[in-house]
Image: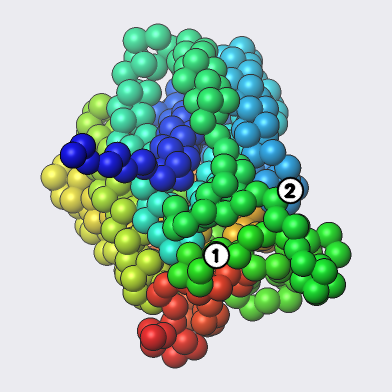
């Protein structure tokens, strides 16, 4: 008798789509800033502070659109939003190839590129994956966000080579064309907003019907404006009849501020190191190609770190996973401060990358555990502006310190202190017994960090 065919849960296709969109949105922008850094500074006659501020503008706008984008992701068509994002990003790259002043660089990075990258970037991908997974959310987020690390592994040396062969302007033109050719059809063909839209349940456990008419008694208990959702067995973690959070409710929750502080401190430090590691390596006498491979070492271990910390986040206390991720980054930065050879620089970058790789999946699993998938996009997006003052200061601050002291050492010592502060902040997090809006999620932890039966 022929063996019955086992169909792969559609959610894993969603993970694959997010892998692609994250590779492009982060690799063509964030991970390419280092290779473009000195070319842009030379073109526009500005110091490293000027280019650092332009790059920071990208991050600022990316964060400011978060609340509106996050709310839209919870209530509008994610597929349509991503389509617009692809078009904005492609046009933005094409426009970057034509800029002739530092002001124009600020303008384009802070408009088309920042908005387009946000609409297909981390917030969108995390929300989409969180819609499709509950019990296996950490692993799914870890795999999806591997696109970020793979882009870092490949794009830094690729961008360096492309700039040498084509020039920085033509490289931006190529980025725009590839965005349209690769990402647009991927989004249009495969993105489905939620498992209920295909009659499925999160994690592929059982089935759910998109539209279920409640009984009169249930209808009387259902809050106004809340869409009735079919209930599955408790182990599936399906959503209950719980309204999405308002704009102000997360702001009254201590967990919102703890998660935001933890993530913003981590991104402040890691963003600065990733942007300035190539200038630092070339200052030490290494070639641009060799310097770009340091980012590849960071991203390469980040690939493993994302899966490792995604897996850990599903199985151990999420706070412990967060502490381990930060501790590894501290070790990596400390190692880089004392390098005397190229192998040591690669080793320090690898240790740093292993811990840095865990930040995105940990962020997503913390939000999901504390606020639930129905409000995931709104909460993550709302964090953006409040994280902004801390998150955006790292890149220009490192440039300012270098311009003042001629060395990155004071900046890196400061970042180690900020990482320690992040570890202290996460100790204040209080995880709910069960994810809000679900029946049972596995595993869960009590206030003291113990695992619930």
Q: Is residue 58 above or below residue 28?
A: below
The secondary element bearing badge 2 is classed as: helix
Image quarter in which the C terminus is found: bottom left
The mark nearer the N terminus, 2 or 1, is: 2
Q: Quick one: SS at disc 1?
A: loop
Q: Front-most of 260 and 342? A: 260
Residue 170, given in percent of the width and then of the height, sits at 48, 10
Q: What number is the disc on residue 302?
A: none
Q: What residue is shown at x 84% (from left), y 72% (from top)?
A: 220
- The figure's colour scheme reads rainbow
Q: To which residue does mark 2 refer?
A: 75
Query: Looking at the picture, how far across and down is residue 428, in whole percent?
Result: 52, 82
Name the foreground residue: 36 vs 426: 426
Tags 2 and 1 touching, CB below 8 Å: no
Mark 1 surroundings: few (<14), some (14-19) or many (≥20) residues within 10 A:
some
Q: Residues within 10 Å of mark 2 (few under 14, many from 20)?
A: some
Give the CA distance from mark 2 to mark 1: 23 Å
Front residue of 40/283: it is 40
Residue 303 placement (x, y as % from top left) = 30, 46
Mark 2 or mark 1: which is in front?
1
Q: Which residue is mark 1?
A: 232
Counting the numbered discs, the total is 2
Front one among 297 and 19: 19
Residue at (41% x, 85% y) in the render: 452
Q: Residue at x 44, y 53 (%)?
A: 204
Q: Residue furthest front?
A: 1
Q: Which residue occupies 22% across, 31% down?
A: 290
Residue 1 lies, in percent from the top left, at 18, 39
The reply, left or right, for residue 249 in relation to residue 179 is: right
Tell me if residue 432 can be seen: yes
Is residue 19 visible to us here? Answer: no
Place residue 52 in its image quadrant. top right
């Amino acid at each position: 008798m022929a063996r019955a065919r086992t169909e792969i849960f559609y959610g894993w296709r969603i993970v694959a789509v997010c892998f692609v969109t994250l590779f492009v949105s982060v690799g063509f922008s964030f991970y390419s800033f280092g290779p473009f850094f000195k070319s842009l500074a030379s073109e526009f006659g500005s110091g490293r502070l000027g280019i650092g501020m332009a790059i920071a503008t990208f991050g600022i706008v990316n964060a400011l659109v978060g609340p509106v984008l996050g709310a839209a992701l919870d209530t509008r068509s994610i597929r349509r939003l991503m389509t617009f994002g692809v078009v904005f990003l492609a046009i933005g790259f094409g426009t970057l190839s034509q800029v002739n002043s530092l002001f124009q660089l600020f303008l384009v990075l802070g408009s088309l590129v920042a908005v387009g990258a946000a609409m297909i970037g981390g917030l969108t991908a995390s929300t989409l994956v969180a819609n499709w997974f509950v019990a296996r959310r950490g692993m799914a987020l870890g795999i999806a966000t591997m696109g970020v690390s793979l882009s870092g592994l490949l794009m830094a040396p690729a961008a360096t080579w492309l700039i040498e062969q084509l020039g920085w302007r033509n490289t931006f033109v190529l980025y725009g064309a590839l965005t349209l050719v690769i990402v647009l059809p991927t989004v249009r063909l495969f993105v489905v907003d939620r498992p209920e839209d295909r009659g499925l349940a999160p994690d592929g456990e059982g089935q759910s019907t998109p539209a279920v008419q409640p009984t009169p008694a249930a209808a009387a208990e259902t809050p106004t404006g809340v869409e009735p959702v079919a209930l599955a067995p408790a182990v599936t973690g399906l959503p209950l009849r719980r309204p999405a959070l308002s704009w102000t409710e997360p702001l009254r929750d201590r967990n919102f501020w703890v998660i935001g502080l933890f993530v913003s401190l981590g991104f402040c430090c890691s963003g600065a190191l990733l942007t300035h590691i190539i200038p630092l390596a070339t200052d030490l006498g290494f070639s641009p190609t060799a310097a770009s491979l340091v980012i590849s070492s960071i991203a390469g271990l980040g690939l493993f770190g994302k899966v490792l910390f995604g897996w850990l986040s599903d199985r151990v206390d999420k706070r412990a996973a967060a502490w381990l991720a930060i501790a590894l980054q501290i070790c990596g930065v400390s190692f880089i401060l004392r390098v005397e050879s190229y192998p040591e620089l690669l080793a320090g970058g690898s240790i740093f990358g292993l811990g840095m790789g865990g930040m995105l999946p940990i962020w997503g699993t913390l939000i999901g555990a504390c606020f639930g998938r129905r409000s995931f996009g709104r909460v993550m997006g709302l964090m953006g502006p409040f994280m902004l003052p801390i998150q955006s200061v790292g890149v220009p601050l490192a440039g300012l310190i270098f311009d003042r002291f001629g060395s990155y050492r004071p900046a890196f010592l400061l970042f180690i202190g900020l990482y320690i502060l992040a570890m202290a902040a996460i100790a204040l997090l209080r995880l709910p017994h069960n994810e809000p809006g679900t029946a049972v999620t596995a595993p869960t932890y009590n206030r003291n960090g113990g695992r619930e039966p």
